[in-house]
Image (tube, rainbow, N blue to C red):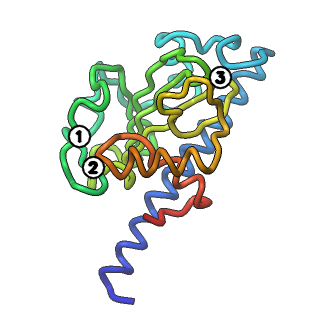
Amino acid sequence: MTVPSLMQNYQRQSYIAQLHKFYNELSQALIQYQTSANAVNLKEAGLNSNDNVAVFFKTYFKVIKECDTMDDCFAPAYLSLNSGKKLEGTYDKNMKSYVLASGAAIRPYYTGQSNKIINLGLDTNGPKGPNIVGRDFFFLYVYNNGLIDDTIGSDNSLNAPLSTEHREKMFTSMCLNDSDSGCFGKILNDNWQMNY
């Protein structure tokens, strides 16, 4: 193995470790939140507006910086995985965002859309590079049943956990095609490996 490929493998493992850590912390916080409310799902527990989502993250995570938009918490721009094109207009930057004590930046947005209730932009290392979708920048989706998965795309009838086939379809049609979504499901399918 050459030195550049060793460095690339190390960097990918580092990105995955940061992503997996945040995923585990969020999963535990969602379970605790729902259990403490003695609720059957997250909406019933109170995750039913952007204001309540903000309270949730400020309660269950150590927030060191709060921003009115993504501009002050995230990198100025993100590049797509395959083409390296600057992503523009694929997500709304005008949402309250946070930097966590871990250095991760998050942008939660309550959608209330069917089973998928929160779109969560995550930069695992904040504004530091490489700022590429599928490397250090991901969109995760929180579902009303408390699970975290990838996007449902346009099929609002789907619920987490998503099928392996659906995740692969989203990876091919979105992550590999200059979108901000579809990469996280591939990582779940590949057992927390970045094989792309």
**Residue at x-position 52% and y-position 51%:** 168
Q: Considering the numbered disc 3 on the image, is that residue within a helix, a strand or a loop?
A: loop
Q: Which of the 4 image quarters holds residue 60?
A: top right
Check the image and name the residue furthest to the bottom: 1
Label 2 amino acid? Ser
Label 3 amino acid? Asn
Return the disc, 2 or 3, that comes first in the chain's sequence: 2
Which of 34/189 is in front? 189
Q: What residue would you read off at disc 2?
A: 80
The local crowd at label 2, few if under 14, some if 14 to 19, many if 20 or more residues have their Cα within 10 Å, is many
Query: In the figure, 69 relative to 181: above or below?
Result: above
**Residue at x-position 32% and y-position 85%:** 3
Measured from the top left, where is residue 40 in percent x and y? Answer: 78, 17
Which of 162/42 is in front? 162
Query: In the figure, 35 relative to 121: above or below?
Result: above
Q: What residue would you read off at disc 1?
A: 87
Measured from the top left, where is residue 13 in percent x and y? Answer: 47, 66
Q: What residue would you read off at disc 3?
A: 144
Q: Considering the numbered disc 1 on the image, is that residue within a helix, a strand or a loop?
A: loop
Label 1 amino acid? Leu
Q: In the picture, which quadrant includes the N terminus?
A: bottom left
Query: In the figure, 103 relative to 119: above or below?
Result: below
Q: Confirm or deny contact between disc 1 and disc 3 (CB under 8 A).
A: no
**Residue at x-position 36% and y-position 72%:** 8
Q: Which mark is residue 71?
A: none
Q: How many marks?
A: 3
Q: In the picture, which quadrant includes the C terminus?
A: bottom left
In whole angstroms, how far apart are the C-alphas of marks 2 and 3? Answer: 29 Å
